[in-house]
Image: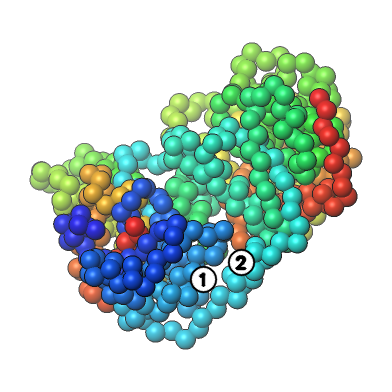
Amino acid sequence: MTTKYIFVTGGVVSSLGKGITASSIGKLLQSRGLQVTMLKCDPYINVDPGTMNPFQHGEVFVTEDGAETDLDLGHYERFLNKEMHHFNNFTAGKVYETVIARERRGDFLGTTVQVIPHITDEIKNRFRAAAKGADIAIIEIGGTVGDIESLPFMEAARQIGLEAGRENSLNVHVT
Amino acid sequence: MQKLREIGIAPDVLVCRSEKPVDANMKAKLSMFCSVPKESVIEAPDVDSIYEVPMVFHKQGLDDQIMMLLRLRTQSKDLDSWNEVVRRLKAPKREIVVALAGKYTDYKDAYKSVNEALVHGGIANEAKVKIRFLDTTDPKIHEQLDGVHGILVPGGFGDRGIEGKIRVAQLAREKKIPYFGLCLGLQIAVIEFSRNVLKLSGAHSTEFDQKSRYPVIDLLPEQKSVKDKGATMRLGTYECTLKKGSLSHKAYGTLNISERHRHRFEVNNKFRKLLEDAGLSIAGLHAPKNLVEIVELKDHPWFVACQFHPEFKSRPEAPHPLFRDFVSACVERAENHVRNPIHA
């Protein structure tokens, strides 16, 4: 079965129930016998939340494979009763780090490296990598719609939706 | 909504967080203005427990709606074990109070997994676990412990409130209150034991006092050359061997476990023999590198402190054994009406 994507976005104050909404949808679809995986993208520039103040950002959740991740991954594991990995959470900082390292290696053969398509392509690659092997990939986009930082993630979500087709992609907006 | 459309994304499902119920009228209005079918406007009211949310959505047909939109068809629908979790949560037979000696008392998300793991421990014992956040900078911290059935010291960094946490660990040891230390909570227990049982005055962690005469907690050897702060701690899963007959062995029911870690500091092996001889049991060890993973106290109802973070592996459908047994020890204390006021 081709993987189907569910994107979860938020319209009001950050994280107000978005993680729980995404996890609950995951739980319901899992109960239907589907293989569900979850992904959280965080639009900030920190490479991971490991160095961030828990007072502002909440707990740092540590995965089995030793990644320091967003606390929503804790909800995913608890609701789905399933282990998450380092690829189930990434930040804008991580995406930029990868793209810039590739640019330094010369991978882009002299082209101008831009948000569209280079950053958005890297985001799409990470969506696909995390979704691999699952029936359903639920992708929660951190922050709120309209934030400058989240724009490349929204654009990547829109493109994936278009490529996957109507029946294979769904947008859930929490407001 | 407008901004979402600007980006070119049309929502298929609208989930509305609301303190007040969203009635049919409101749903119709939202449906019209957001151009989402009525069946796909889903209400997400405030609930007592986050674990009720899947059922709240299910009752509104959200899963059927998603299955239809994604052209999915499966027969099975199995939420039995989840429903049992919610049932137990909603009908606790008893209530206990756990004191949490942390640093970020005003922002509960800072200890999300610990809070949830305590809830899971409650599910296993059919108990409601009330958490009392302690102000560890309060010199009269013992007064905050009145009526608590257990004490938990979670992981943390920075030296604010450290002396308060050490005091709390001492009270737990002396007054036989169930104690559960996680990461820093283990280090606190070791410092307290060294100072007050071994009489090593000034014993400390080199994280907080680099010149301590008795550095009972010290940087992991592999950490000594680490300069960068990002992703450089001892992170992720490591194995641990338990001591036969220990509280931890009893909890896990096996001698070989693996747990998740996130730390730079560790029990200083130079003091291990001293600690053990004085009655602090080393109940868990990471044998390949000879690192202390768990300490326990004998002659105490339940005193377990671990260097790892068991909270990350606890699930509502599979409560973590240490959280289960800690809550069970708290329940026992509550039911025996042990309610001695705690004096300094």
Residue drawn at x 56%, y 40% is: B262
Whether tag 1 and tag 2 are in contact, CB under 8 A, the answer is yes
Among the 4 quarters of the image, the one containing residue B66: bottom left
The x and y percentages for residue B91 are: 69, 65
Q: Which amino acid type is shown beneath numbered disc 1?
A: Met
Residue with the mark numbered 2: B86
The x and y percentages for residue A98 are: 28, 45
Q: Is B72 left, or right, of A33 in this rendering?
A: left
User: Disc 1 is attached to a residue of which chain?
Assistant: B
Residue with the mark numbered 1: B55
Residue drawn at x 41%, y 58% is: B18
Among the 4 quarters of the image, the one containing residue A149: top left
Query: Considering depth in this image, is B289 or A5 the residue closer to the camera?
Result: A5
- Quadrant including the N terminus of chain B: bottom left
Q: Which amino acid type is shown beneath numbered disc 2?
A: Val
Give me the C-alpha separation between circle 1 and circle 2.
Answer: 9 Å
